[in-house]
Image (cartoon, grey):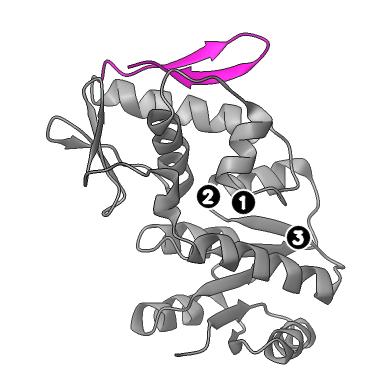
């Protein structure tokens, strides 16, 4: 059984070496990169099981690298940055990162977050959809969980990984109302540290994409509580 491979991308050698040392002590295989472009090129050749990205890098920064990775993969991503503004954390999560940790950080805390995310993803993202068949339909929308696709008629919704997880979870649990906190836990995990407004942003974007394909499926706001879909 091959070791879990983690890419560490940071333009500071000291940070790369520190993260690498702690991860290797836990038995992970680690490959380091000083810029986003070389990491992306290597990922296309030999995909890793997780990436830890610094945001502030020259040429291709962490945001841009995350955006490019999400076009080709659902690989878990943790962003590490000296920027600790709420808007920076929300932007990273919107782009598809799984977690965000600010510098200076505890290497031990980072290792715990790595383990938590890998444990969650290794149990299979399809655990969100436990349909007896290979597809699940709600209104005029069909989910293909094995392919992580959502289709209306022949029009496929162009969703980010988090948008897919969000909509798939609501459809699987249609007619049930969930609070923002419950949705955060279901999509990002119990260890998520951030503003629940990330859910509101997801709702806004998914609603727009449903309208674009002229779907009758609607995400309903239950005022003072949360969201649901009916079907």
Q: Element under label 2?
A: loop
**Residue situated in front as seen by the camera: 216 or 16:** 216
Total count of labels: 3
Cα distance between the residues tagged 2 and 3: 15 Å
Cα distance between the residues tagged 1 and 3: 11 Å
**Residue situated in front as seen by the camera: 183 or 18:** 183
As drawn, 42 above or below 197: below
- Report if the CB atoms under discs 1 and 2 are less than 8 Å apart: yes
At label 3, counting other C-alpha atoms closer than 10 Å, the crowd grade (few under 14, some 14-19, many 20 or more) is many
Q: Residue 177's spot in the image, x, y percent? A: 54, 19
As drawn, 56 above or below 185: below
Q: Is residue 125 left or right of residue 154?
A: right
> If you read the primary sequence from the N terminus, does the residue marked by circle 2 or circle 3 appear first?
2
The residue shown at (44%, 54%) is 125
The residue mark sitting in front, 1 or 3, is 3
Q: Residue 188's spot in the image, x, y percent? A: 60, 48
Q: Residue 119's spot in the image, x, y percent? A: 58, 66
Q: Quadrant of residue 113?
A: bottom right
Q: Is residue 2 left or right of residue 194?
A: left
Q: Quadrant of residue 211?
A: top left
> If you read the primary sequence from the N terminus, does the residue marked by circle 1 or circle 3 appear first?
1
Q: Which residues are magenta?
A: 215-231
Res. 61 in view: no
Q: What residue does disc 2 label? A: 95
As drawn, 35 above or below 190: below
Q: What residue does disc 1 label? A: 92
Q: What residue does disc 3 label? A: 101
The residue shown at (66%, 43%) is 90
Q: Quadrant of residue 8?
A: bottom right
């Amino acid at each position: 059984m091959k070791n879990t491979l983690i890419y560490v991308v940071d333009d500071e050698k000291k940070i790369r070496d520190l993260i690498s040392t702690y991860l290797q002590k836990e038995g992970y295989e680690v490959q380091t990169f000083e810029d986003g472009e070389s990491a992306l090129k290597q990922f296309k050749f030999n995909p890793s099981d997780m990436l830890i990205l610094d945001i502030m890098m020259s040429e291709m920064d962490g945001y841009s690298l995350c955006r490019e990775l999400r076009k080709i993969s659902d690989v878990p991503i943790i962003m590490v940055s000296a920027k600790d503004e709420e808007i920076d954390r929300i932007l990273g999560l919107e782009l598809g990162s799984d977690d965000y940790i600010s510098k200076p950080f505890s290497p031990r805390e980072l290792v715990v977050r790595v383990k938590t995310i890998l444990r969650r993803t290794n149990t299979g993202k399809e655990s969100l959809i436990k349909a007896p068949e290979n597809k699940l339909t709600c209104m005029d929308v069909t989910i293909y969980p094995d392919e992580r696709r959502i289709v209306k008629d022949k029009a496929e919704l162009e969703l980010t990984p988090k948008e897919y997880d969000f909509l798939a979870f609501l459809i699987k649990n249609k007619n049930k109302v969930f609070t923002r906190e419950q949705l955060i836990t279901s999509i990002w995990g119990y260890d998520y540290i951030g503003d629940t407004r990330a859910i509101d942003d997801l709702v806004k974007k998914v609603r727009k994409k449903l309208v674009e394909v002229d779907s009758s499926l609607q995400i309903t706001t239950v005022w003072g509580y949360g969201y649901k879909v009916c079907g």
